[in-house]
Amino acid sequence: MGGKDTELILGIDIGGSGIKGAPVDLRKGEFATDRSRIDTPQKAKPDEVAEIVAQIAEEFVDEVGADSPVGVTVPAVVHHGVARSAANIDDSWIDTDVDKLFTKVLGRPVVVMNDADAAGEAEVHYGAGKDVAGVVLMTTLGTGIGSALFLDGALVPNTELGHLELDGKDAEDRAASSVREEKDLSWKEWAKRLQRFYRHVEDLFWPDLIIVGGGVSKHADEFLPLLDLRTQIVPAQLRNDAGIIGAAWHASR
Ligand code: BGC
């Protein structure tokens, strides 16, 4: 695999406001050093973002070596290394072979995956879904709604449940955390929308556990108790670190 310590793998999470990376200690599922962050340019295109990702990778050569694989997340469907959607990013991402582009720009193997799938991998291996058998569903509530579905710890990639239709609208346009902020919804008002979303999802998938991530999960006490579901629903444990940790984990496989 290369690198100085095969247990340290670099993970990089491409978000709407920041591109963040850190070497991850895969034995512990934790960052081995402080993370680095660079603002995401407005309307960022793949080439521009690849340069920033390369810059972050450069910063951690001492920790992970110059040739170990790098795990990267994007907020899009990633089907066999190719981005296939662009709900909250520039349309130029669609049909870009992101594995190939990033591997070329970084000069080392890069494995790109959906951001929610990465966060889910981290929670399932190190966090709220660790050792949980059966069907586990991770959801991330942020600018959009992301999802990651697992059966006995194995990921079914690109489930995209944030785009389920609810009351004639995209679910994430009704119930994402960004909608709560934009519309200044109270926790109770927002919880009503989440209730519709999660009830629909549990009726379709019958999960054993639902994990709620995204920045707003730190306020889980404000809204999770307002939901009336048959499925156990818990806040994510790795919070904002989950994307980076899950991407590193995935790249190490
Ligand atoms: C995208 C997903 C992504 C989610 C969270 C959605 O709009 O379609 O691919 O996982 O936002 O970023």
Image: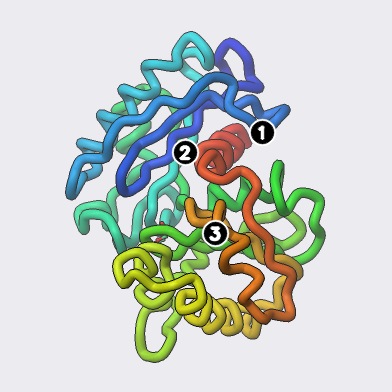
Q: Is mark 3 within 8 Å of ligand 1?
A: no
* Mark positioned earlier in the residue sequence (1 or 3): 1
Q: Is residue 9 left or right of residue 21?
A: right
* Residue 154 location (% of width, % of height): 69, 55
In this view, 85 is above or below 61: below
Looking at the image, is 151 positioned above or below residue 1? Answer: below
User: Quadrant location of ligand 1?
Assistant: bottom left
Judge the density around disc 2: few (<14), some (14-19), many (≥20) Cα neighbours within 10 Å: many
Please name the residue that numbered disc 2 is placed on. Answer: 111
Q: Which residue is mark 1?
A: 29
Q: Residue at x 70, y 46 (%)?
A: 127
Labels 2, 1: front one = 1
Q: Is mark 2 within 8 Å of ligand 1?
A: no
Q: Quadrant of the N terminus?
A: top right
Q: Which picture quadrant has residue 231? A: bottom right
Crowd rating for badge 3 (residues with CA inside 10 Å; few <14, some 14–19, many 20+) = some
Residue type at tag 1: Gly
- Type of amino acid at the residue the image marks with label 2: Val
Q: Reading the chain from its start, which is encountered first: label 2 or label 1? A: 1
Name above or below for residue 196 compared with residue 134. Answer: below
State the image coordinates of residue 34 (x, y, percent, origin top left).
Answer: 50, 22
Q: Is residue 214 in sight in this rendering?
A: yes
Closer to us: mark 1 or mark 3? 1
**Whole-Å distance between the Cαs marked 1 and 3?**
21 Å
Coordinates of residue 93 in the picture (x, y in percent): 26, 52
Direction from residue 166 to residue 121 in the image, left or right: right
Q: Residues within 10 Å of mark 1 (few under 14, many from 20)?
A: many
**Mark 2 to mark 1 CA distance (whole Å):** 18 Å
Q: Which mark is residue 157?
A: 3
